[in-house]
Amino acid sequence: MPLVRFLSEVVIPYEQDEVTRLIIDTHDQQAFAPLSSMTVGEFRNWLLSDAADSQRLAEVAAGITPEMAAAVSKLMRNQDLILVARKCRVITRFRNTLGLPGHLAVRLQPNHPTDDPRGIAAAVLDGLLYGAGDAVIGINPATDSPSAIGELLRRLDDVRERYAIPTQSCVLTHVTTTLELIRQGAPVDLVFQSIAGTEQANRGFGINLAMLDEARQAARALQRGTVGHNVMYFETGQGSALSANAHGGVDQQTCEARAYAVARHFQPLLVNTVVGFIGPEYLYDGKQIIRAGLEDHFCGKLLGLPMGCDICYTNHAEADQDDMDTLLTLLGTAGVHFIIGVPGADDIMLNYQSTSFHDALYVREVLGLKRAPEFDDWLERMQIALAGQLLPQGPQQPLLQLAQEVA
């Protein structure tokens, strides 16, 4: 199958789908030129060769379409997906620098089933004392009330400012709610939105490309970043378009890769696939979740995205925490941008199993991975860590003032 065929034969008609139009209209022919004579199989061989180093992969990323990435991933073993993804380097910045070689960030996810401020504060404190939170401190709210979400944003921003934490905060509400809160003067760092790979599926999420562009411009206008201006945070997941009957007859992995074209267009700080959350209707067991996680990470990195993964499963799937340990280790080896940190790996609001603060300590120790440099410096100033290693907790730590307030 020649790669050029994906440019002339689209999987969802150009006239019917704005994601297809985005893929075709923004395709970089100059970046694609070195690949234009290749078949999918030859593309695989080139990706695995020494010629495809980090610089060359960055140079051709804009010429690769999602369909090309999905197609070549289907010819690859797991080790191939890991090897190529590891060579892809994507660096993003807001209040710290993410994606540097040899680094792994963690989203601190302090969810609470009633958005109780003390419960959220306790989880934030727990995560910070374990050195988590350099990717983002991000809450999935239990309500879509703008006033409640605004209060969560203000509380997170108060903690961040009081302790001068070089990270970013986010409340993962709908983009329209975030836009309204920006207009009201709320302290919005990142704009979050779940996205999919077809116009119809995105319409099911209540979004379109113009809406995402408006939100990006509004967030950038706030100029809250200190070292960069990547302001978008997207989440995806295989099966979302299929579950909404909005896949247009396209397989779920290719639909997932098309979502990465949407993400790429808006230069996000963070993107992650919530790989096992949708359940065994789409990924049956641990083996399939592991494979899907490696596919998603590979496709996202190949397209030039700061790709993370919520390494997770639901309790009715044929999977367990051993499967998550395996995927965590594989993705850490593959150079994943960031993972999720949840107290005890058990999200008590979303009712699914993810990875814990301890899991991040494990993979960093085993693979020698560092936190974002600005965040690591802060941990040392706060006497939480020294030379990347956690220090024993004691009353001398300034952050324990927050613990006393929570108590």
Image (cartoon, rainbow, N blue to C red):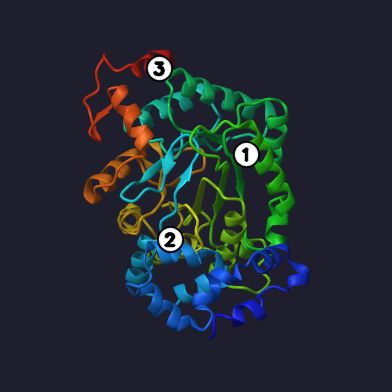
For residue 333, which quarter of the picture?
bottom left
Q: Amino acid at mark 2?
A: Gly
First reached walking from the N terminus: tag 3 or tag 1: 1
Q: Amino acid at mark 3?
A: Leu
Residue assigned mark 1 = 173
For residue 191, which quarter of the picture?
top right
Q: Is residue 399 visible?
A: yes
Point out which mark residue 293 bears.
2
Point out which mark residue 392 bears.
none
Q: Amino acid at mark 1?
A: Thr
* Residue at figure coordinates x 71%, y 50% from the top left: 207
Along the line of sight, which residue is nearer the eye, 399 or 212? 212
* Residue at figure coordinates x 37%, y 46% from the top left: 355
CA separation, marks 3 and 1?
A: 26 Å
CA separation, marks 2 and 1?
A: 24 Å
Tell me if 31 is positioned left or right of 198 in this view.
left
First reached walking from the N terminus: tag 2 or tag 1: 1
Mark 2 is surrounded, within 10 Å at the Cα level, by few (under 14), some (14 to 19) or many (20 or more) other residues, namely many
Residue assigned mark 3 = 402
Q: Is residue 64 visible?
A: no
Tell me if 371 is positioned left or right of 10 in this view.
left
Along the line of sight, which residue is nearer the eye, 289 or 190? 190
Mark 1 is surrounded, within 10 Å at the Cα level, by few (under 14), some (14 to 19) or many (20 or more) other residues, namely many
Tell me if 130 is positioned left or right of 240 in this view.
left
